[in-house]
Every structure is written in structure tokens, then in C-alpha cells.
Image: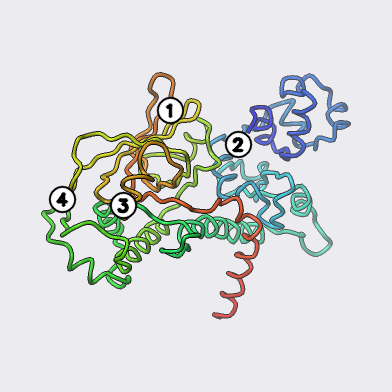
Amino acid sequence: MNRTVSALVRRGMSTSQAESLHRRGLTLGKLRQYSPEQLTQAGIPETVCDAIRAGSRPLIPLKTVLQLLYANKSICCVCQNERSGIVIHHVTPWAESHDHSESNLVVLCPGCHDRAHTTKEITRDLTPEQLLHHKGEWQRAVKDARTKVLFTNRPHSLTDGFWDVFNRQRLLDCANSQNIDYSTLPGATRIQASETGHDGKHYRWEGRLRMGEHNEYAFYSDLLRRIADEYDWIDLRRIWTKSEFDSLLKTNTLFALTAHYKFRTENDVVRGPGQTRRVYYQKKNLRIEFSFDAWECITNSAHSCHLLGAWTCTALGFVRSLEDINGCRVVRATCLAIGTGFSDYEGEIPKIALIAEARREAEADAI
């Protein structure tokens, strides 16, 4: 988000109006030189005029703004019209609450924002309770749509995404630390039988997980899905600025990123465990890096082709550290899985409203 647009949105202006003013070359500094009449003539709401000129109301913290926009996909939580600009609205007005916390903020389009401020003779058009209900429903639908892209693919279809590597050690460690019961997942019995032991730190298996072992692939794919459900994981495909990284990522944040990664062999091991490969993706002054054991590759093509040199794939992992190194923000991660062929989440945006409606219908049927 442009700095001028961000500054105006944080003062209560809609994104569409802020972008329009930015295109006209109007910065926050220039607008502060306008008289109240000039600001009104420019179509700026009175509350925003006050925030621009006096600066009496503290800005909504940028971190809060970015977290809220990410959770709502920068779309109005009421009408879910992705073509409309948006306004960040205080559920309980700032004048009453002095509360800029995420729990008191909702993302609305200008039309729904007007409805939220409209008081009819009997009831308000959009009450605070209704706004919070819409917000909760919409944020769950957005998360469902993100997860759907990674976890509804058929494991052996040539037209769907496929997980090429599972970090079995970390997946089981993570599941155990989160008290996830995986004993009922398909293939769980075989997985437990294939473990040759656990020394308190590491699991040991008889061999690699192979593509033909359908139950094992389904087990780790389902386990990965359950782990993702436990976390508010971050899709980094449309997030690539330092401010967004700092707002959305911290140690132990689960993230997914589809990118054109570069792979580098780290040692001379060519057989058995320990075939370490380092992976990174860097664009401008931001970098993601992690390593994995190529022995965990499920197919020969992944081992000898897909995950060598440079390849576009999807990685799911935990942030282990964020550092500034020579002016570059470096995120070091622990990889849980690497896959190829997953569809673009942006293509799912028009379907999110249908997902939300289906959820409501299912809940109604269950009552």
C-alpha cells in the first residue's frame, strides 16, 4: 500500500478515495494546507477532515491495519464486493471507545460504511452486533478459501497440486506439541508400524515415503491440513513489503509461499538420509530461506528434477527468525512440506461469498 494511501486510510478514508487523491498528486502534507472548506469540497468526510488537519485522533497502528486487511482480503465483510474500495470502521466509535484494537475494527465498503452510520427511526441499519457477526463469518470464509487451495487437491491427479516432500519429523513433532490426535487418520496404523523407534528427539523410519504408498501420502497430507487448521497461517503470495512482513510474521508463524525458488545442494551425500538442500527466494530486499532433506522426496522426478536448480513450487513452514542482514530482511524457516502445481488463491476470491453462504446453510441445517 502506498504511503499516502496508507496514511489516509489510517485516518478513516476509503481506499478508493485515498487512491484517487494520490493519483491527483495530493499528499497528506498538501491536504493539511487545505482549509476545512477545501477539504469538504474535495468530498472528504468531516471526521477525516478533522483527522487530517488537527491530528487529534491517534492513527490506527499500521500493524493493526495490515493484519485486518489481510484477514479480510481487503474486501468488505458485509457485501463482499471485491471491486469496491474499503473503509476501516470502528464498531464502537472512537469518540466513545478510544479503541484502535483489531477487535473494534471492521472492513467495510463506502456503501456499507454509510449504512453503519445510518440510524433509522427504530433500528440502526447495521448494528455493532451485526457488524461483528459479518466480520467473523467473512474472516472464516477467507481462511477456508486459502486452505482449500492447498488441501483439496487429489493426491495423484496430473491436473492438481502434489506435495513432493513432507518433513515427517517436524510434522509429527508439531502435531504432538499441539495435542493433535492423528490416530484416526487414514494410514495412521501403517505409519506407526513403519516407525522403527523414537529416541526422545527423533523418529526413525524403515525407508522413504514413496508415491505408491497412498495411505502414507494421505496421512501426511491430512496431518498437514490439521496443523494448518490449528494456526492462523499467512499466505505470502501477495505480501512482499517490509511493513507487511513485520506486521504479519513473527517467530512460529505458519506461512505458505508459492514462488520461483532456487535450490542448492549443501553436501556430497547422494544416498540415504542427510541429503541437505538449501532453498531460498529473494525479491528486492526480502528473502525467505530454509533447508530440507532430499531423501524425503516422494518421487524420483522431485528428487532429480523439480527440486533442483530453480523451480516454482509451494512451501509451507514455520518462521524461525527474522533478521536484517546487509539491508535485507531475511526470514529463516523450518519447512514442513514442499509441493508443486497448486492453483492460485486469487482465483478463489469470487467463490468466497459462496463458501460463507454454504457455511451458514450447513449451520442452519444442523440446528
Amino acid carrying mark 1 in the image: Arg
Q: Residue 60 bears which disc, if any? A: 2
Q: Distance between the residues labelled 3 and 2?
A: 51 Å
Q: Considering the numbered disc 3 on the image, is that residue within a helix, a strand or a loop?
A: helix
Question: Which corner quadrant holds the N terminus?
Answer: top right
Q: In this view, does 167 lie to the left or right of 119?
A: left
Q: Which of disc 4 and disc 3 is earlier in sequence?
A: 4
Category of crowding for the residue at label 2, using alpha-carbon neighbours closer than 10 angstroms: few (below 14), some (14–19), many (at least 20): some
Q: Where is residue 204 in the image (x, y as percent from the top left)?
A: 15, 56
Residue found at x 29% / y 38%: 277
Q: Considering the numbered disc 4 on the image, is that residue within a helix, a strand or a loop?
A: loop
Amino acid carrying mark 4 in the image: Lys
Q: Which of disc 2 and disc 1 is earlier in sequence?
A: 2
Amino acid carrying mark 3 in the image: Asn
Q: Considering the numbered disc 1 on the image, is that residue within a helix, a strand or a loop?
A: strand
Q: How far apart are marks 1 and 2 (CA)?
A: 24 Å
User: Residue under circle 1?
Assistant: 329
Q: Distance between the residues labelled 3 and 1?
A: 34 Å
Residue found at x 38% / y 45%: 306
User: Residue under circle 3?
Assistant: 300
Q: How far apart are marks 3 and 4 (CA)?
A: 29 Å
Q: Distance between the residues labelled 2 and 4?
A: 44 Å
Foreground residue among 106 and 309: 309
Q: Which of disc 2 and disc 3 is earlier in sequence?
A: 2
Q: Where is residue 14 in the image (x, y as percent from the top left)?
A: 73, 40
Disc 4, disc 1: CB below 8 Å? Answer: no
User: Residue under circle 4?
Assistant: 201
Q: Which of disc 4 and disc 2 is earlier in sequence?
A: 2
Q: In which quarter of the image is residue 229?
A: bottom left
Foreground residue among 333 and 39: 333
